[in-house]
Image (cartoon, rainbow, N blue to C red):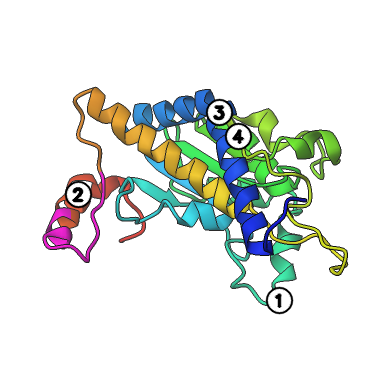
Amino acid sequence: MSDGTPADRFLDAAIGLLRQVREEEAGAIAAAGTLLADTVESGGRLFAFGAGHSSLPAQDVVYRAGGLALMNLLAVPGVVGIDVSPAVLGSALERVDGLASAVLDSSPLRDGDALVIISLSGRNALPVEMAQHARALGIKVIGVTSVAYATETASRHSSGTFLKDHCDVVLDSKIAVGDAELTLDTVPAPFAPASTVVTSALMQSMVATAAATLADRGVEPPLLRSGNVDGGHDWNARIMEKYGDRIYYHH
């Protein structure tokens, strides 16, 4: 382990991971951003899903200043965030067969839409089944995951497959199994997870690529502005009115 305080070492680890995904995932980020731009241009809708702490990067791109207004959160009761009590119930629900298909079948998602599924391990039934069923419905799937889990752990889905096996585009976060960047002789367990930092960066990079791609095609990207800058509310009202039939978080 390098010298420095635990904060220094964590930041160094996070920066190293960000550099790694910048170098190694550039093609996948470009492909994912292009897929989102294609979906917007063709009249489709955008959705993002993550379970547990993987829901944080999904929420980070929904109704976000500087983000695409068309990005909607696909919510699965009991698994989005840690608001469910007890919190361990959310982890249990990720392993329930049939839940993802039921959610998709009752959601607005349809043929021609795009769904970003975030799952660090990609091994539980929920993300695997969601990707499988979404593609069967004609929905394009972008998976954001750590591919390392597919070689170092066993799938918890009946098919024996992982999220990465059912995606049109896969973004690898490069996070090591266990999601903890630091160890100390005085601390009995590894600590300091970096998955949220890296995954959020991948999500924002993908959205930025989509916005720039649309602009290059002569299409105004449907971006939101901060409500805390002058004119922001009026700007957002115009975007909401124009794209209201493809936005679900304000109904």
Q: Residues within 10 Å of mark 2 (few under 14, many from 20)?
A: many
Vertical arrangement, residue 242 with respect to residue 32, above or below = below
Q: Residues within 10 Å of mark 1 (few under 14, many from 20)?
A: few
Q: Label 3: which residue?
A: 23
Q: Residues within 10 Å of mark 3 (few under 14, many from 20)?
A: few
Vertical arrangement, residue 188 with respect to residue 15, above or below = below
Q: Amino acid at mark 3?
A: Glu
Q: Nearer the viewer, mark 1 or mark 3?
A: 3
Which mark is drawn over residue 239? Answer: 2
Q: Are marks 4 and 3 in contact (CB under 8 Å)?
A: yes
Vertical arrangement, residue 130 with respect to residue 227, above or below = above
Q: Which residues are magenta?
A: 223-235
Q: Nearer the viewer, mark 4 or mark 1?
A: 4
Q: Label 4: which residue?
A: 20
Marks 3/2: CA–CA distance = 34 Å
Residues 167 and 158: in front is: 167
Q: Earlier in the sequence, mark 4 or mark 2?
A: 4
Quick one: SS at disc 1? Answer: loop
Quick one: SS at disc 2? Answer: helix
Q: Amino acid at mark 2?
A: Ile
Magenta span includes 232: yes
Q: Label 1: which residue?
A: 86
Quick one: SS at disc 3? Answer: helix
Tell me if 239 is positioned left or right of 8 in this view.
left
Tell me if 93 is positioned left or right of 233 in this view.
right
Q: Earlier in the sequence, mark 1 or mark 3?
A: 3
Marks 4/3: CA–CA distance = 5 Å
